Amino acid sequence: MRDYRNFINNQFVESIGGGAIDVQDPATEQIVAQVPSASAEEARAAVDAAARAQKDWAALPSVARGQYLHKLADALDARAGEIGQALAAESGKSLADATAEARYAAEITRYHAEWARRLEGEVIPSDNPDENLLLMREAIGVVACLIPFNFPVYTLLRKIAPALIAGNAVVVRPSNNTPCSAFEIAKAVQQAGLPAGVVNILTMSHQVAETICTHPKVGMITLTGSVGAGRKVLEYSQVNIAKSSLELGGKTPAIIEPDANLAQAANDIVGSALSHCGQVCTSVERAYVHESVYDDFVRLLKERFTARQWGNRAEHPNYMGPLVNASSRLNIHQMVARAVDDGAVLETGGVLPEGKGWFYPPTLLTGCRQDMEIVQEEIFGPVLCVLKYQTAEEALRLANDHQFGLASVLYTENYRTVMRFANRIEAGELYVNRTPADPYQGYHSGWKRSGLGGDDGKHGMLEFTQTRLVIMKY
């Protein structure tokens, strides 16, 4: 069993009384590691270390910060095997997928390193003839980064790389379900030689996380998580008026028009709905299918759902793996049961498997209505709801009739339909003839209850800056 230490001021430190957190393999329920539960004192020490380091870090030329990020990316690549092993054991992912996630994290780190020479301000015309207005981009200070369990390696670098290139220091709280990979990343931070205090990584209780988020030296909180977690962060941010960037829940709709390539759409949607056992913010959870192709498309979906095998990915890398924990599985199963009681048709899946591991079979529901809980609430599991529509206008209305607006999907060959959806879909992303994959040069930002701010690309990097207007009279 692995044993880890919190990473503060570039050192792995002994715990000072916060206790320990057991980390379980969700495929076997075995404890694979113990990590420390940081005390409030340790949390404050991490913020203080970040605050001390941040001034000197921001004073470096941005190109120097970029060079450090390139070194970090190289260290992530060099340690991808160790990071992948830790991630596979704690998440239920296959070793190949977990290692690939580490390498993808290195790539987004390199991407943000390249912003070193592109951090720009603006020169704005003044109303006065003897005056210039200079809008400058500056670091915020210390950023608290709250990381989810589903893609904990990629999301950690997705947040800290743009924060660092902008001149901030970070305090990272990984998920208690998947913390081991974060400490393997901390070893890469050491290996890359980043200045002490610039990156700090600690595991902790929710109460201690509040200590960090409400610390007066924390200027920004960035979270990927649930709507409930987002509400808590907004409460925390009120204490010191800290900036918040939140990527929250999703309920991706996929609209299947009559002219769609049905086989391609079915393959893509099944892949999206079942990827990482449906534990992806942009997983397709709602499929709106035109009535003229409804029966054919349901048949294609059912064939693929039924054929998809599930089990321990350490033994069967191509299978669908487990959910994160027992409570998640029970909540999903109860949602499915309530949907069936409310009139949905269970085409496949929908049972609690016996034996070890928090597995849930691919579950397909037809005959769903727009007002059903399972259509309105995020499932975050391997469940797809299918609904029928008559016109594209109706499909657009149904897709938009929702509390979430993270991603959306449209399958059609008609450019007029594409432009209608592109101009009117109420979501931060529209994928045409493909399913979501979050290109890191884009901007991943949710509408409605799906969040505030966003990640990726130029605009994601600028989230980690604040402005100063300099009025120069001459």
Image (tube, rainbow, N blue to C red):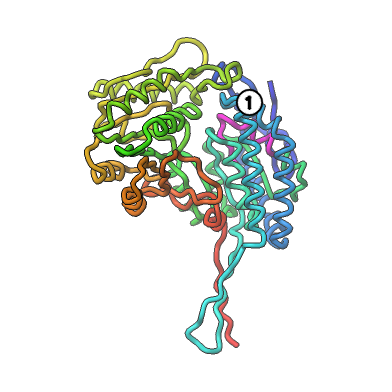
Q: Is residue 274 left or right of residue 254?
A: right
Provide residue 227's location: percent of width, then percent of height: 41, 41
* Image quarter of residue 471: bottom right
Q: Is residue 305 left or right of residue 95?
A: left
Q: In the rendered view, tell whether residue 85 sits above or below residue 350.
A: below
Q: In the rendered view, tell whether residue 409 sits above or below residue 322.
A: below
Secondary structure under tag 1 reads helix
Provide residue 323's location: percent of width, then percent of height: 49, 24
| Between 341 and 235, the one nearer to me in the picture | 341
Part of the protein shown in magenta:
171-186
* Image quarter of residue 85: top right
Q: Is residue 1 visible?
A: yes
Q: Is residue 10 left or right of residue 268?
A: right
The residue located at (55%, 78%) in the rendering is 133
Type of amino acid at the residue the image marks with label 1: Leu
| Between 241 and 299, the one nearer to me in the picture | 299
Residue 182 inside the magenta-drawn segment: yes
Residue occupied by mark 1:
95
